[in-house]
Image (tube, rainbow, N blue to C red):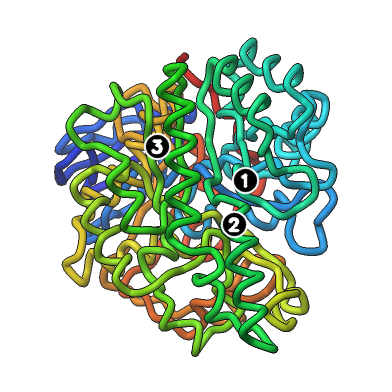
Amino acid sequence: MSYIIKNINIVGEGKIIHGDVCIKNGIIEKIAPIIENVEKLREIDGEGQYLMPGAIDDQVHFREPGLTHKANIYTEAKAAVAGGVTSFMEMPNTVPPTFTHELLEEKYNIASQTSLANYSFYMGTSNDNIDEVLRTNDKKNDVCGVKMFMGSSTGNLLVDSPLMLDKVFGGVELLIATHCEEEPIIKANLAKLKSEKAVLEPADHPIIRNEEACFESSLKAIQFAKKYGTRLHILHISTEKELQLFTNMIPLEDKRITAEVCVHHLHFTADDYARLGNQIKCNPAIKDAHHKPALWNALLDDRLDVIATDHAPHTWAEKDEPYEKAHAGLPLVQHSLLLMLHYVKEGKISIEKVAEKMSHAVARCFQIKNRGFIREGYFADLVMVDMNKPFTVSKENLLYKCGWSPLEGFTFPASVTNTFVNGHLVYGNGVFDESKKGQRLKFDR
């Protein structure tokens, strides 16, 4: 199906223009003030609405294979497109972890059959799979990047061998995305707190996984990257202190070291543990309230380059445990764009800046081919939003397999009305058309 979207406010590249957009064969064919519908294409009236490039989430955990009691690629990609996220990049901490290219291609195969959004998957690193990691150099155009957990307590995902760190940073030719928390600091903080308290609680989480643990690990990653000139992307920055490590003095395309901020670190603070408890337990932790305005300032002045979710669903039973046993992570991909549009209404950020940080900058950062912008000749990954149609999160409209959200009861001032993936209207006014699946992302490297 081809479409003409009429009379809509087109958001992109720092401006808003009013006009029409023609979509043909999955591509944006024409953008103009008025497009005459001489071919009788299907028309969608966009009067009063905004057309944005589909959000690209560079950090999600969709749990397939091996953890599909929590989520799977089908359910979470469906939630994503309902929220205006048209492409995602998924992490390697599945079961088994994605430590070989055979396992990596298995995930691509699953997504090709089930994902309603476009997709890419990171190659995982451990202390002993350097040969597999370096094979990724031959797939620069087909894989989003290499993921390294420089702070983790799960299985063999933690890379803490100096020799392995040296080999990865010295040998990988594409983007390395890092989770940065210094494990010895975390363990020392935990031991100290346990010696002082009989029972730990969710509010202790940012004390255990504190600012120092994040800063020291991020600094270490940057030192390795600068040693070799490696392309480094540090995920989910959560502290004020880390912000001194990043610059806004050069264009994004010229940066070798970039940083991501996640919506939950922009929205919640440690004060929210009293209300939400383990629901907002995540790594790195949601921290003291003074970090939040610092993160916002760094986002707005471009020291922080992209906005993502770190969408990490767990079952309610896994979250409803005593603090030490409760799993870390929260589901967010259905509501990330709406949460940022809430802050547009609040006057915190412009809608043009949201498009930049959730679409343009992600495409630039990862060098994604022909996506992330509303441009003629680009894939029609588009989302229509009504800024005057409130949407309240409830159990009934959640699409995550886990069936819960820390945002339940929250009313957004805006709604996603239509989402196009590769020109296919996959979500329109609450109805899904699952007849076409998303595509594998390609990269210009």
Which amino acid type is shown beneath numbered disc 2? Phe
Residue 236 coordinates in the image, percent (x, y): 46, 51
Marks 1 and 3, the one that precedes in the sequence: 1
Residue 212 coordinates in the image, percent (x, y): 44, 57
Q: Look at 52% across and 59% down and name the residue there.
A: 284
- Secondary structure beneath dot 3 equals helix
Q: For this rendering, which residue is in front, 148 or 23?
A: 148
Which amino acid type is shown beneath numbered disc 1? Leu
Q: Look at 39% across and 52% down and name the residue there.
A: 261
Residue 195's quadrant in the figure?
A: bottom right
Total numbered circles: 3
Marks 3 and 2, the one that precedes in the sequence: 3
Q: Is residue 66 left or right of residue 24?
A: right
Q: Are marks 1 and 3 in contact (CB under 8 Å)?
A: no
Q: Is residue 362 left or right of residue 75?
A: left
Residue 222 coordinates in the image, percent (x, y): 43, 33
Q: For this rendering, which residue is in front, 190 or 251?
A: 190
- Secondary structure beneath dot 2 equals strand
On residue 259, the disc is none
Residue position marked by numbered label 2 in the rendering: 432
Q: Are marks 2 and 1 in contact (CB under 8 Å)?
A: yes
Q: Look at 47% across and 53% down and name the residue there.
A: 214
Residue position marked by numbered label 1 in the rendering: 116
- Secondary structure beneath dot 1 equals loop
Task: Please tell me how crowded label 3 is: few (under 14), some (14-19), or many (20+) other residues with Cα within 10 Å.
Answer: many
Marks 2 and 1, the one that precedes in the sequence: 1
Task: Please tell me how crowded label 1 is: few (under 14), some (14-19), or many (20+) other residues with Cα within 10 Å.
Answer: many
Which amino acid type is shown beneath numbered disc 3? Val
Q: Nearer the viewer, mark 2 or mark 1?
A: 1
Residue 168's quadrant in the figure?
A: top right
Task: Measure the C-alpha gap from mark 2 to mark 1.
Answer: 10 Å
Residue position marked by numbered label 3 in the rendering: 362
